[in-house]
Image (cartoon, coloured by chain):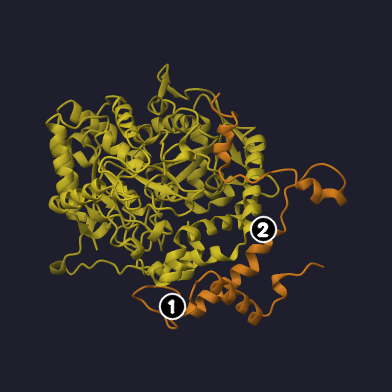
Chain colours: A orange, B yellow
């Protein structure tokens, strides 16, 4: 059974988030502890709560997905999946640059 | 608060920008061009001036009140000498003076410069297909010498030294900017102040600021719907052209990625930002796109693409034997469960819309299904856009996160997707594109959309247009209802053809909202309190 963010305690999740913020140079202490209507910016606690929900739901949905290879036996699925759907930042433009549209 | 940029300020700021350019400081621009475009702007200007807007039959309402005119009608009136460009622009400025206190469609106005440009049109010194046409420019487009804030504290004191290419093309075509359109802070939500307090209202429900006007191109939409400008441009990353068009009875067109330059637009998500018009009808949208579209040396995404086609002709209705028909046979895909996404009166309107579309000769409705992984790849995978908004703003996040105000959360969320997850997202885009082009669009030429997100992810074109009005309910006044069609890459012309035929057999697009009631202390009428969005709401609904 693979490990999951859902296995983390709230304290562990919060520690991870706070550490990641520090690594990125983001100072949580610059946010207010109580709501500031002048800026509308989230408080430290509300931002942390929002980030905990995000971390629990989103990365795992992305990092467990692989494009279907459509080829080979199930045991080789991930190996063949490496060969399909190379990353495209601008997929519609690539359609034009590869001559598939506008002809 | 609306900033009025008077002519003196405008000229001083412009002179300042020019002076900076003369010093040759790295990264600064000449007054005439952006750093990377140079002389190519002369060629661009020559090209846009060759675009011809057809003379159209002008409705009596538009002759009686110039603010009623479509762009094509207004261009016809000016070219025929029925009105001057100054009269056309002044009519819109006067209306803005009367009603923008309620609408709050602008966060900067450029009245003096607009009138100066209109006078130049009347003297024959400013020409082009948009000569004298009053336009609203969303406030995330660089406009030389005019503050460009993206409605964010982060850009509060920013006065660009050059024009965004998209605005430069409109300017070269003779268009007249009458103001910078209010927007969601940094293009995230409906227009609010940076602290979340709602500013711009839906022009159809000005007394009820709770009704969503669509965002983030809210100000451009409200200005056109409220007849403060003939047309406008906005940007779309997650529906920000299409949704305000649908909610305010306009025709909005989000072109294919690369069709219109993004150079000089404040970025929200590099791979998903698009520029397009919010217009009164399909012909106006086509004229605007014709001017906007083209390669830009400053934006590699615009290069090496199929040349723009004749959008204006595509947007003209075709009639044979007195009956409207599609310019060419077009299969219109209707996703399984399309009508399930609507309730009550909206469902009735969508059914009527499908029936009207089906009755147009040349239109063939076909049922299509979505791939099995559609919900995942267009749902949770939508988050893949977030690191792209974080990266260009990281210095601000590090220095003063409060500057993001109510919009902060999604910028911080971007820190929590790893590089490998972002790459997986780009692979998913590729996979999704093949599913859409080879499977879904293999069975149809255009596709009705149940969400704006999928074609934003893929950079495919979409057009939003009105299909009726949902009756008032106990909690909501009568509001416009729209539909969205998507197409294959660089097939904007096909979308325009379909909507041209539909608008030729319907009149929803000709309807205009009533004038708002202005707050008047002597009559004890008060403006309704504007709601305030929370940070969580903004994160949940962010483009």
Looking at this view, name the residue that lies furthest to the top: B321
Task: From this view, report whether residue B408 is shown above or below residue B131.
Answer: below
* Snapshot quadrant of residue B522: bottom left
| Left or right of B186 on screen, residue B430 | right
Q: Residue B458, how many percent across, how many down?
A: 56, 44
* First reached walking from the N terminus: tag 2 or tag 1: 1
Q: In the rendered image, which quarter is residue B177 located in?
A: top left
Would residue B370 be seen by someone viewing this image from the given angle? no
Neighbour class for label 2 at 10 Å: few (<14), some, many (≥20)?
Answer: many
Q: Please state the chain letter of the residue tagged with numbered disc 2 in the rendered image.
A: A
Badge number at residue A62: 2
Q: In the visual, does B249 lie left or right of B342? A: left
Residue shown at 35%/50% (left/top)?
Answer: B27
Write down the residue under mark 1: A30
SS category of the residue bearing label 2: helix
Is B103 left or right of B339, judged from the image as shown? left
- Where is residue B226 drawn, in percent x and y? 27, 49
How far across and down, in percent of the image, does residue B402 sit?
Answer: 40, 72
Give the residue at x 69% y 59%.
Answer: A63
Q: Secondary structure at mark 1?
A: helix
Residue B502 lies, in percent from the top left, at 44, 33
Q: Residues within 10 Å of mark 1 (few under 14, many from 20)?
A: some
């Amino acid at each position: 059974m693979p490990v999951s963010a859902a296995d983390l305690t709230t304290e562990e999740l919060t520690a991870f988030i706070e550490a990641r913020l520090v690594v990125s140079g983001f100072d949580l202490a610059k946010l207010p502890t109580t709501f500031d209507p002048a800026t509308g910016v989230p408080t430290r606690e509300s931002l942390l709560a929002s980030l905990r929900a995000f971390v629990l739901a989103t990365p795992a949905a992305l990092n467990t997905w692989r494009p279907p290879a459509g080829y080979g036996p199930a045991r080789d699925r991930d190996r063949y999946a490496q060969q399909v759907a190379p990353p495209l930042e601008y997929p519609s433009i690539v359609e034009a640059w590869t001559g598939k549209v506008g002809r | 608060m609306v900033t009025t940029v008077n002519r003196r300020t405008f000229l001083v700021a412009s002179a300042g920008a020019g002076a900076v350019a003369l010093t040759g400081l790295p990264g600064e621009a000449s007054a005439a061009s952006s750093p990377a475009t140079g002389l190519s702007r002369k060629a661009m200007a020559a090209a846009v001036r060759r675009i011809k807007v057809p003379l159209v039959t002008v409705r009596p309402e538009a002759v009686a009140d110039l603010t009623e005119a479509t762009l094509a009608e207004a261009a016809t009136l000016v070219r025929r000498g029925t009105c001057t460009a100054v009269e056309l622009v002044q009519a819109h400025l006067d209306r803005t003076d009367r009603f923008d206190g309620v609408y709050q469609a602008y966060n900067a106005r450029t009245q003096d410069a607009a009138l100066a440009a209109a006078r130049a049109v009347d003297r024959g010194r400013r020409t082009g297909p948009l000569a004298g046409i009053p336009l609203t420019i969303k406030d995330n487009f660089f406009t030389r010498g005019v503050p460009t804030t993206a409605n964010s504290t982060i850009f509060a004191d920013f006065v660009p030294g050059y024009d965004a290419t998209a605005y430069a093309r409109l300017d070269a075509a003779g268009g007249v900017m009458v103001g910078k359109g209010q927007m969601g802070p940094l293009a995230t939500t409906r227009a609010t102040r940076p602290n979340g307090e709602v500013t711009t209202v839906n022009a159809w429900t000005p007394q009820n600021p709770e009704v969503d006007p669509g965002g983030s191109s809210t100000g451009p939409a409200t200005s056109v719907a409220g007849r403060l400008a003939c047309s406008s441009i906005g940007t779309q990353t997650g529906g920000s052209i299409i949704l305000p068009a649908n909610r305010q009875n306009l025709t909005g067109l989000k072109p294919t990625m690369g069709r219109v330059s993004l150079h000089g637009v404040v970025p929200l998500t590099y791979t998903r930002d698009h520029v397009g018009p919010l217009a009164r009808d399909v012909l106006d949208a086509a004229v605007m796109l014709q001017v906007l579209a083209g390669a830009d040396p400053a934006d590699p995404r615009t290069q090496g693409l199929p040349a723009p086609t004749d959008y204006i002709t595509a947007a003209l209705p075709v009639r044979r034997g007195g009956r409207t028909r599609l310019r060419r046979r077009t299969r219109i895909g209707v996703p399984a469960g399309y009508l399930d996404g609507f309730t009550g009166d909206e469902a009735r309107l969508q059914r009527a819309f499908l029936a009207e579309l089906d009755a147009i000769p040349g239109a063939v409705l076909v049922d299509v299904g979505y791939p099995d992984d559609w919900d995942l790849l267009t749902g949770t995978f939508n988050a893949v856009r977030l690191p792209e908004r974080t990266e260009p703003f990281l210095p601000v996040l590090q220095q003063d996160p409060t500057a993001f105000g109510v919009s902060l959360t999604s910028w911080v969320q971007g820190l929590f997707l790893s590089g490998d997850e972002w790459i997986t997202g780009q692979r998913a885009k590729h996979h999704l594109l093949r599913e859409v082009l080879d499977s879904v669009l293999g069975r149809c030429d255009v596709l009705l959309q149940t969400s704006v997100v999928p074609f934003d992810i893929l950079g495919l074109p979409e057009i939003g247009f009105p299909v009726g009005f949902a009756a008032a309910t106990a909690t909501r006044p009568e509001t416009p209802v729209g539909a969205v069609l998507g197409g294959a890459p660089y097939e904007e012309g096909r979308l325009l053809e379909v909507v041209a035929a539909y608008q030729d057999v319907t009149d929803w697009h000709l309807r205009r909202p009533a004038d708002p009631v202005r707050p008047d202390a002597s009559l004890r009428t008060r403006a309704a309190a504007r709601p305030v969005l929370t940070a969580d709401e903004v994160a949940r609904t962010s483009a």
